[in-house]
Image: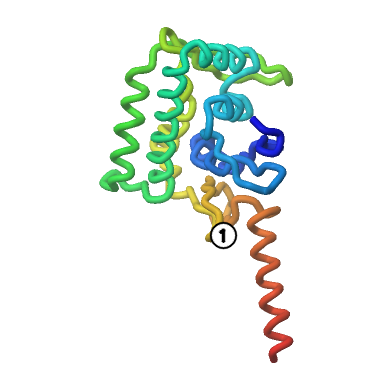
Amino acid sequence: MDTDEAPESFVFVGERLWLDFVNSDDAARNRKGTRLDALDAFDTFVQWLSSARILDAERASAMLKRAQQQPTGASAALHEARRIRNVLRALAERGGAPAERATQVAIGEINRILGRSAGTRRVEPRSDGGFTRNFVTVGDVFAGLLIPIIESAADALVSGELVRVRRCADSRCSRVFFDGSRNGKRRWCEMATCGNRAKAARHRRKVKLNVNG
């Protein structure tokens, strides 16, 4: 990846793993300010999975090596990740009630992926002294990449969290997030970016009105 295209860092504002995955189409900005899609290539997908603490450094390295050995399998895994992201975005933006088509499609995909998964779940230490829960696949190593994300989406459905999922109030921003605020009125994915933009726009309008008045 070219230096100018490489992200400074991935942004995680969804408050839930599955929502951060939905936001991975705008997961970072490069040095030119261009939005970067974490699923643009398999290597950036693995980088995002590492940043999301789904893969540790050892597994990420092994996954990239396996992708070189099995490019067709890596390409298929990336294609499925993009498709599942679209399904989960529809769930985040239009899902909720069991009768909603977006909810029904998402449940079908969640059950399909969970049903085909074969492996073990392990709690393992992280390099920073904390712990992480990993899903170690048996057989197809690419098949387990989406499991933690799918489980996060399943948890949201089971716990009834969809009523607290919001899309950023900035019409230019497509990021979604879980609103864990006490009053349930969080509007912005990030106050430092979209929130401040809105504040600046209101200030400009106020100044213009005062000048014209």
Foreground pick, 107 / 141: 141
- Furthest residue in direction top, as rendered: 139
Residue 139 against residue 134 in the figure, above or below: above
- Which residue is drawn at the image coordinates 62% and 18% (left, top)? 56
Of helix, strand and loop, which one carries label 1? loop
Q: Quadrant of residue 201?
A: bottom right
- Furthest residue in direction bottom, as rendered: 213
Residue 150 against residue 74 in the figure, above or below: below
Apparent side of residue 110 relative to residue 195 in the rendered image (left or right): left
Apparent side of residue 21 relative to residue 199 in the rendered image (left or right): left
The image quadrant where one finds the N terminus is top right
Question: Identity of the amino acid at label 1?
Answer: Asp
- Furthest residue in direction left, as rendered: 99
Q: Quadrant of residue 119?
A: top left
What count of labels does the image hold?
1
Foreground pick, 203 / 128: 203
Residue 139 x/y as whole percent? 41, 8
- Which residue is drawn at the image coordinates 61% and 27% (left, top)? 47
- Which residue is drawn at the image coordinates 29% and 32% (left, top)? 108
Residue 31 x/y as whole percent? 72, 43
Residue 68 against residue 19 in the figure, above or below: above
